[in-house]
Amino acid sequence: MRWLSAALLLVLAGLAIWLWGYGGAGDLSRWAADGQRDVQQSMAGYLRGLKRGEGGAFAGLMGLSFAYGFFHAAGPGHGKLVIGGYGVAAKVSALRLSLLALGSSLAQAASAVLLVVFGIAVLGWGRAQLSAAAEQWLAPLSTGAIALVGAWLALRGIRALRRQNESEVCNSCGHAHGPTPEQAAEVHSLRDAVAIIGAVALRPCTGALFLLIITWSMGVFAAGIAGAFVMGLGTASVTVLVALASVNLRAGALSWLASSARLRTVSGALQIVIGLAIAVIAVQMTLAAL
């Protein structure tokens, strides 16, 4: 198991060096953007076929929607930042984090549906106003919320280090004077899930907005709603992989620690470092969006 963790660490380290040391992040962003643009252009044909009642048009549209979600998630994004960072910083199972990644992607699709329905039906907005609302208002709010999640993780790490001695059983009375890290994790899990899903979902997917606006104008809005959630599944196909990688990365990094006390100390320090990193990157993203 340790050799597998070590191999994963080497692969991730090599990937990080390629992404940020040799311009891989830019290449990946361009590849993802090209893929999204090609998918958007192909969607128009399937939408016209759907309007005419052609067989296979709906299935083709759903396939393209999934592909768009995949390409969208393959580029840089705040969802992978918070899911991956949380998986490395906090002790969470692979299944729970994968469900969190899936929930975040589907909630992002739901926010796109709500924005379009409210914007068009209630406020009478057009495509330009909806896009501006997503990019100029909701994007900074989302990355700002993620910065708060990062700060919260760091603060929790500080608190965990402070109460580490209190969580041990007292030699004099034989009782614990505070919750164990495992008990604290159970208390925080639901709160963490709500905070992370909410922060990601604040910014709706631009591809989902594009599809929803067009299908509303063509009178096939139900297909647009279905496509938006299928896009969410495409996005989740990448974020779930990020979730699994982050959990394994944490396990590999901490596998050499035999002492539970040392493990708790390093775990608290990880929350501080990763939380601060998430907060700093999210603040940069917020300032760039303003």
Image: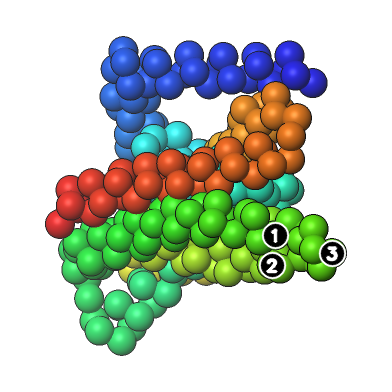
**Residue, x 30% and y 60% (percent of image)?**
144
Give, as a three-letter code, the residue at label 2: Gly
Q: Residue furthest left?
A: 290
**Residue, x 54% and y 56% (percent of image)?**
162
Residue beneath disc 2: 178
Q: Secondary structure at mark 2?
A: loop
- Whether residue 158 is visible to the viewer of this picture, yes or no, is yes
Q: Is residue 190 left or right of residue 150?
A: right
Q: Is residue 246 left or right of residue 27?
A: right
**In what quadrant of the picture does the C terminus appear?**
bottom left
- Image x and y of residue 110, in percent: 49, 67
- Image x and y of residue 134, in percent: 28, 63
**Residue, x 31% and y 15% (percent of image)?**
21
Tell me, for residue 174, which label it has, or none. Answer: 3
Q: Nearer the viewer, residue 228 or 4?
A: 4
Q: Nearer the viewer, mark 2 or mark 3?
A: 3
- Image x and y of residue 221, in percent: 46, 69
Would you place residue 112 above or below residue 44 in this image?
Answer: below
Tell me, for residue 96, which label it has, or none. Answer: none
Local packing at callout 1 (Cα closer than 10 Å; few below 14, some 14-19, many 20+) is: some
**Residue, x 50% and y 66% (percent of image)?**
195
Residue beneath disc 1: 167
Q: Residue furthest front?
A: 172
Q: Nearer the viewer, residue 26 or 116?
A: 26
Q: Marks 2 and 3: CB-CB under 8 Å?
A: no
Give, as a three-letter code, the residue at label 1: Ser
Q: Marks 2 and 1: CB-CB under 8 Å?
A: yes
